[in-house]
Image: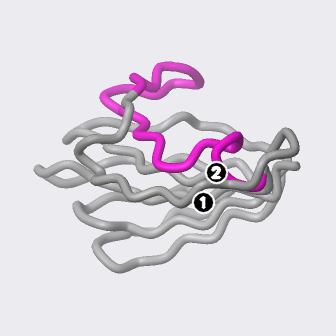
Amino acid sequence: MGGRAPEPKVLNLNAAPTTALTGDGADLATGMELLDLEEGTGQFDFRAVRIEAGGISADHSHPHEQANYILSGQGRVDLGDTSHDVGPNDFVYVPPGMRHVFANTGDDDLIVLAARGPRG
């Protein structure tokens, strides 16, 4: 946070800065940053991931927990050695250190909202 108070923020998902996700096997996936660590308190960040039809997110793990909400599309999430079908309004919690990957199994974009933290 750098000694400053966080500022309120309103941002349309379609106006969010985007980054192609290519590491750890990701393909046809785009990250959309909604709240960066430096914009808030530094405890968590919040973003959306758009996975095109036939695409897949990074196959990875990290030391922080991650809360995910499926906004639209159809897909599969692998959590460790277990797979689950997911769709709109599904919630997926990923504990710290757990390997996870999202795959789009439908014809439309799979959009996943993700809060990751604590990060500070």
Span highlighted in magenta in the image: 19-41
Helix, strand or loop under label 1: strand
Helix, strand or loop under label 2: strand
> Where, quadrant-wise, is the N terminus in this rendering?
top right
User: Which residue type does callout 2 highlight?
Assistant: Asp
Q: Residue 11 placed where, x, y %?
A: 35, 53
Q: Is residue 70 left or right of residue 53?
A: right
Q: Residues within 10 Å of mark 2 (few under 14, many from 20)?
A: many
Question: Is residue 28 shown in magenta?
Answer: yes
Let me know if residue 78 appears in the view. Answer: yes
* Contact (Cβ within 8 Å) of mark 2 with mark 1: yes
Indicate the quadrant where residue 14 lies. top left
Q: Residues within 10 Å of mark 1 (few under 14, many from 20)?
A: some
Instruction: Give the residue at mark 1.
Output: 115
User: Which residue type does callout 1 highlight?
Assistant: Ala
Q: Disc 2 versus disc 1: distance between alpha carbons?
A: 6 Å
Question: Front-most of 4 and 81?
Answer: 4
Indicate the quadrant where residue 52 lies. top left
- Which residue: 43% across, 36% down? 31
Q: Is residue 87 left or right of residue 45?
A: left
- Which residue: 40% across, 45% down? 49
Question: Front-most of 65 and 13?
Answer: 13
Instruction: Give the residue at mark 2.
Output: 45
